[in-house]
Amino acid sequence: MNTDNQAQGVRDLLKKIYGEIYVKYAVRNPLCGIGEPITSELFKSKLDSFIKQTPIHAVRAS
């Protein structure tokens, strides 16, 4: 994930992605192997929806 150096709250955003999306939809998914690329469409969809709701995305999309 790339961000502008001036972006605020990125650390908190990454913590939320880890705790609310990565752990829930990748780590706990028995079909996702540790160290392998994440191919889960549900994970990708949840991450995409989450990112689009963040202030960082709103600034970038403008």
Image: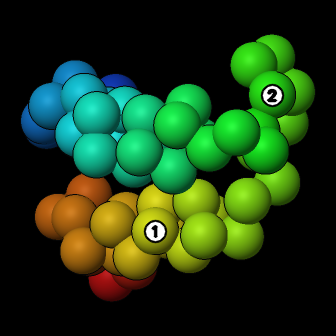
- Residue 49 at x, y percent in the picture: 40, 76
Under tag 2, what secondary structure? loop
Residue projecting furthest to the top: 35
Residue closest to the eye, 17 or 4: 17
Residue that mark 2 sits on? 33
Residue projecting furthest to the front: 30
Is residue 16 in view from this perspective?
yes
Which quadrant would the N terminus be assigned to in this image?
Answer: top right
Q: Which quadrant of the figure has residue 34? A: top right
Residue drawn 58% across the image and 60% down it: 43
Q: Which quadrant of the figure has residue 7? A: top left
Residue drawn 37% across the image and 64% down it: 51
Q: Amino acid at mark 1?
A: Lys
Q: Is residue 9 left or right of residue 39?
A: left
Q: CA distance from mark 1 to mark 2?
A: 19 Å
Residue drawn 28% across the image and 45% down it: 20
Q: Residues within 10 Å of mark 2 (few under 14, many from 20)?
A: few
Q: Is residue 48 left or right of residue 12?
A: right
Residue that mark 1 sits on? 46
Question: Which mark lies nearer to you, 1 or 2?
Answer: 2
Is residue 2 in view from this perspective?
no
- Residue 45 at x, y percent in the picture: 56, 74
Residue projecting furthest to the bottom: 62
- For marks 1 and 2, the one nearer the N-term is 2
Q: Amino acid at mark 2?
A: Gly
